[in-house]
Image: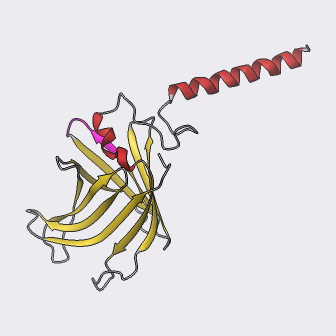
Amino acid sequence: MSKLTRCCFFVLVLLNYSSLSAQNSYEYAASKAHPFGLPNPDAPEQIKDYAPMIGECDCKSIARNPDQTWQTEPVDMIWRFKYIMNGFGVQDETLKSDGGHSGSIRQFDQDSAKWFVHYYSNKGLTPVLSAWSGNKKDNGDIVLYRPQKAPNDMDGFYKITFHDISEEGFKWLGEWVNTTETFSFPTWKIDCKKRKNSE
């Protein structure tokens, strides 16, 4: 075996070892065996709040028109959830048939016992991402809030609720609520069915 051949062989062995070592170091990241990643056992237990949603769903999205009437035809949408950061966070993205795509990065903060969700979209590029915070309720819903004033300058929140969550799918509601939640104005509804073999 020539010196050059031995050198090439050594480099290939080293690269293969490095690749295997990296895979072992990040065993909860997305892979061929687990395309949507896995929850890291060292992450907060709440990382599993989104477990039923991990994978892909086929969804129908209905929002209000500028005149405040509801759309008559729903928008088809794929909603994909996966674990990121080696199983310490959750990322989702939506792909809509009308060209409005978006996504979020979801991290759980143990000190405040809240999820922090940072949202981005191809329709509204901003230097600072919008953020919601909240947690999973006793009834199984995941509820998130972001301060937002009403058009008449009344204080309130834009409230997001994941509900009817199961291995079969989930529903999503976006609504403006006043600070005491005695008034609600829904603006967006999404109904999702889990794709088979998407976990």
Residue at the spot 70% in from the left edge and 20% down from the top edge: 14
Coordinates of residue 25 in the picture (x, y in percent): 51, 25
Q: Nearer the viewer, residue 35 or 164?
A: 164
Reply above or below: 98 against 196: below
Q: Residue at x 23, y 44 (%)?
A: 114
Left or right placement of residue 100 versus residue 167 in this view: right
Q: How is the image coloured?
A: secondary structure
Q: Is residue 53 left or right of residue 186?
A: right
Vertically, is 95 above or below 86?
Answer: below
Q: Quadrant of residue 146?
A: bottom left
Examine the rendering and report whether any part of residue 128 can be seen.
no
For the N terminus, give its image quadrant. Answer: top right
Q: Position of residue 179 (x, y in %)?
A: 11, 63
| Magenta segment boundaries in residue numbering | 107-112
Seen from this angle, which residue lies furthest right?
Answer: 2
Q: Is residue 110 magenta?
A: yes
Quadrant in which residue 161 is drawn: bottom left
Q: With 99 as the anchor, is 151 left or right in this view?
A: left
State how many labels appear.
0
- Residue extending furthest toward the bottom: 67
- Image height of 58 relative to 92, above or below: below
Residue 113 is situated, as x and y percent measured from the top left of the image, at 21, 40
Q: Identify the residue at image location x=56%, y=28%.
A: 23
Where is 66 relative to 105, above or below? Answer: below
One can see residue 66 in this view: yes
Does the stretch in magenta take in 111? Answer: yes
- The residue closer to the viewer here, 151 or 80, is 80
Front-lying residue, 52 or 50: 52
Tell me which corner region of the image, top left, top right, bottom left or bottom right, holds residue 110.
top left
